[in-house]
């Protein structure tokens, strides 16, 4: 029996900066997971992934990541996506440093 489809977001890395980015419903990209489009239909997810992969001047390594609806938008369901969202954990820099200064 096939597994039930779980909601997804399209994620990739920004081609020039390397930052983790997420596809929004209007086909633009954001660095904030909460602004990403949460896709609940498997066919739509595949089409959105194709759209992301066609934007080779912006993205690299696009894929579908499991997510769930949260209070403020999509949230990761796997530690890998939480790790990608917050950056490396071996020392403070980048996103982690900015979050610490808030």
Image (cartoon, rainbow, N blue to C red):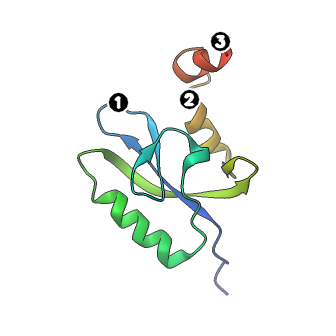
Q: Nearer the viewer, residue 9 or 29?
A: 29
Is disc 2 placed on a helix, strand or loop? loop
Residue that badge 2 annotates: 87
Q: Position of residue 6 (x, y in %)?
A: 65, 69
Residue drawn at (48%, 74%), measured in percent from left and top?
A: 44
Say which mark, if any, is on residue 17. Answer: 1
Residue drawn at (34%, 63%), measured in percent from left and top?
A: 51
Question: What separation in Å lies between label 2 and label 1 (alpha carbons)?
Answer: 13 Å
Earlier in the chain: of badge 1 and badge 3, it is 1
Q: Quadrant of residue 4?
A: bottom right
Which mark is in front, 2 or 1?
Answer: 1
Q: Quadrant of the N terminus?
A: bottom right
- Mark 3, other Cα within 10 Å: few <14 / some 14–19 / many ≥20: few
Residue 61 vertical position relative to residue 45 in the rendered view, above or below: above
Is disc 1 placed on a helix, strand or loop? loop
Q: Quadrant of the C terminus?
A: top right
Left or right placement of residue 82 versus residue 59 in this view: right
The residue lying furthest to the front in this view is 26
The residue lying furthest to the right in this view is 71
Give the total number of marks visible in the rendering.
3
Residue drawn at (36%, 58%), measured in percent from left and top?
A: 52
């Amino acid at each position: 029996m096939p597994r039930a489809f779980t909601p997804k977001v399209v994620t990739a890395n920004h081609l020039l900066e390397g930052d983790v980015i997420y596809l929004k419903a209007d086909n633009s990209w954001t660095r904030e997971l909460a602004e990403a489009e949460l896709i609940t239909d498997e066919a739509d997810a595949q089409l959105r992934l194709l759209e992301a992969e066609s934007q080779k001047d912006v993205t690299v390594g696009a894929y579908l990541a499991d997510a769930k609806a949260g209070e403020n938008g999509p949230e990761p369901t796997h530690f890998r996506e939480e790790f990608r969202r917050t950056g490396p954990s071996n020392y403070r820099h980048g996103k982690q440093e900015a979050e610490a200064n808030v």
